[in-house]
Image (cartoon, helix red, strand yellow):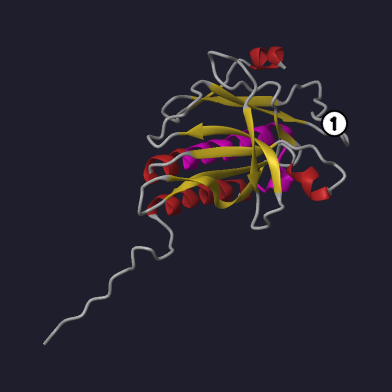
Amino acid sequence: MLRTTSRTRIGSKGFSLVELLAVMTIIAVLLSLASVGISKIGKGQGITSGIALAEGLVSSARSIAKGKGTTARLIIHSELNDNDPTERSRYRRLMMVVYHEIDPETGVESQTWSRSGVPVFLPDQVYFSAERSRKEVATGDEWSKDRFQLSNDPSDSADCYYIEFNSQGICTTPGASFVFENGARPNNEERAILGKTRNIGGFVIWRNGSTSMIRDIDQIDSEG
């Protein structure tokens, strides 16, 4: 008697192990934030929670890049448009991982960006500080920008800051610093107004994707 076996078609759609691990990393971070209640997070806790979220996405971007053998980026919304409530809520707070799909036939990277999971938002009144963040140790320039589609709507795109990992999981701008500010941001102002306690904090991303906290707050403040 002939035995038949079912085989998964090579071209079938599904989640890879890398994508599942990346999503699980983000979920773990979000669950930890939910345990304290983001709506009740104090200023210091907001910065700490924002750092944890960003570090989780850094890890996710590197895992996808290395696991799929492709280019992946962590992007942060950077387009100021306070006339639109949705765009106002996204500005310097929305973060997401995107990557290039690999053509299974040719092994060539696609030139379009695919989104991994859903956008993640920093806690209320916590913003990415482009002014205090640096692209890399050697240059000290501001993070690079590119345009990305943020949802399934082709017209829903915006300029975003980004850091990139190559197919080996290596950060292409080692020493990039990722700094947050906590405060109220008036309409049409790029930056939040900080209180006397200077609620800022951040970390550095190294070549292998590891991160280290920036301990010298005075140094961060002097750069902004």
Residue at left 44%, top 54%?
A: 20
- Which quadrant: the C terminus? top right
Determine if the magenta segment contains residue 56: yes
Front-lying residue, 116 or 204: 116
Up-down relation of residue 177 to residue 25 (above or below): above
Q: What segment is highlighted magenta in the picture? A: 36-61
Residue at left 40%, top 45%?
A: 108
Locate residue 12 relative to residue 136 in the image: left or right. Answer: left
Determine if the magenta segment contains residue 194: no
Identity of the residue furthest to the front in this view: 106
How far across and down, in percent of the image, does residue 78 sit? Answer: 71, 36
Disc 1 secondary structure class: loop
Locate residue 36 relative to residue 124 in the image: left or right. Answer: left
Up-down relation of residue 8 to residue 154 (above or below): below
- Which quadrant: the N terminus? bottom left
Give the dominant element type of the magenta stretch: helix, strand or loop. helix
Front-lying residue, 108 or 91: 108
Q: Which residue is mark 1?
A: 189
Locate residue 53 relative to residue 206 in the image: left or right. Answer: right
Front-lying residue, 36 or 165: 165
Tally of numbered tags? 1
Identity of the residue furthest to the bottom in this view: 1
The crowd level at tag 1 (other Cα within 10 Å; few <14, some 14-19, many 20+) is few
